Image (cartoon, rainbow, N blue to C red):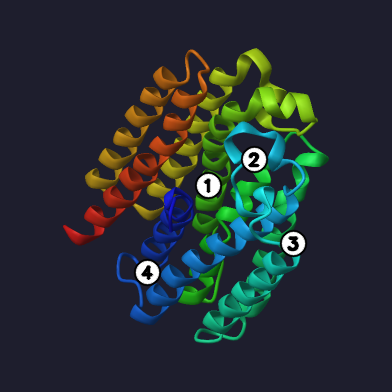
Amino acid sequence: MDRPIGIWLLMYPTLWALWGSSNGRPDAVVFGVFVVGVVVMRAAGCVINDYADRKIDPHVQRTQDRPLASGEVSPGEALTLFVALMLIALLLVLFLDSQLLLLASAGAVLAMTYPFLKRYTHLPQFYLGVAFGWGIPMAYFAHLHALPAECWWLLGANVFWAAAYDTEYALVDRNDDLTIGVKSTAILFGEYDRLMVLVLHALTLVCLSVFGLTKSLGGWYWAGLFGAALIALYQQHLIKERKREECFVAFLNNNWFGAAIFFGLFLDYTLL
């Protein structure tokens, strides 16, 4: 709750799916469960991420003061909290269709395994996109008991979007990561980092455009996509010098990117 950007980056794709799967009229119980679930799962993700990085974070300027890195919290305490949060998430799913448990279990595996990937691949950002977007197929199944093609276009959009914003995030730590041997797309892309962020944002908008065409959405939705495109271009300006502070601001700016898409979708359905 201290740094809610993670909640919003997890919330917006879930809201896209809740509105898309219900044609703008999400079930009240489903909406409530998913909103609370986003906050709980983001918290659980923070805990398991800090646990996985407890020996790395002390060597990274931005993360030295995290509770596990500083010794304020023990690894055992962190794991206990993680298990408690995951049990809460499980209880929330039980308010909905029991068939959702299979999808929820897959989401739990994604959340638990993502933090460890940066040791083995330069592409953890894409895996993050699946983990952060797993609420999309869950929301569709909760409303429709089906996973139509439009659901996967939304998930694809979120994978590309997460790869874009998490590359910006990784640019903040790139020098530290190179020193300690942590992998990321920011390192993989090298001098093409800025171009690749642009390409990833463009692919996000392509997937969202296909989604909009599939759903026959109107002007407000397309206005939202246009606003998101302008925000992506502004982020290009922010990261042009690859300065830590400005790359972090660009990462935070993705809150507005996700919001533009959601409010375009929301207004399109509300003002029909």
Marker disc for residue 158: 1
Left or right placement of residue 246 versus residue 70 in this view: left
Q: CA distance from mark 3 to mark 2?
A: 25 Å
Mark drawn on residue 75: 3
Q: Give the Cα distance between marks 2 and 4.
A: 29 Å
Q: Which x, y percent locates residue 77?
A: 69, 68
How many other residues sit within 10 Å of disc 4, few (<14), some (14-19) or many (≥20)? some
Q: Mark 4 belongs to which amino acid?
A: Ser
Tag 3 near tag 4, CB within 8 Å = no
Secondary structure, mark 1, is: helix
Q: Please say whether residue 3 is visible from this viewpoint.
A: yes
The quarter of the picture where the C terminus appears is bottom left
**11 is higher (above) or lower (below) than 256:** below
Closer to the observer: label 3 or label 2? 3
Foreground: 63 or 18?
Answer: 63
Residue 35 at x, y percent in the picture: 42, 68
Taking the spot 43% from the left edge, 54% from the top edge, the residue there is 2
User: On the picture, is 223 further left or further right than 98?
Assistant: left
Q: Amino acid at mark 1?
A: Asn
Mark 2 or mark 1, which is nearer the start of the sequence? 2
Front position among marks 2 and 4: 2
Provide the residue designation for mark 2: 125
Q: Residue furthest right?
A: 120
Q: Residue at x 35, y 31 (%)?
A: 231
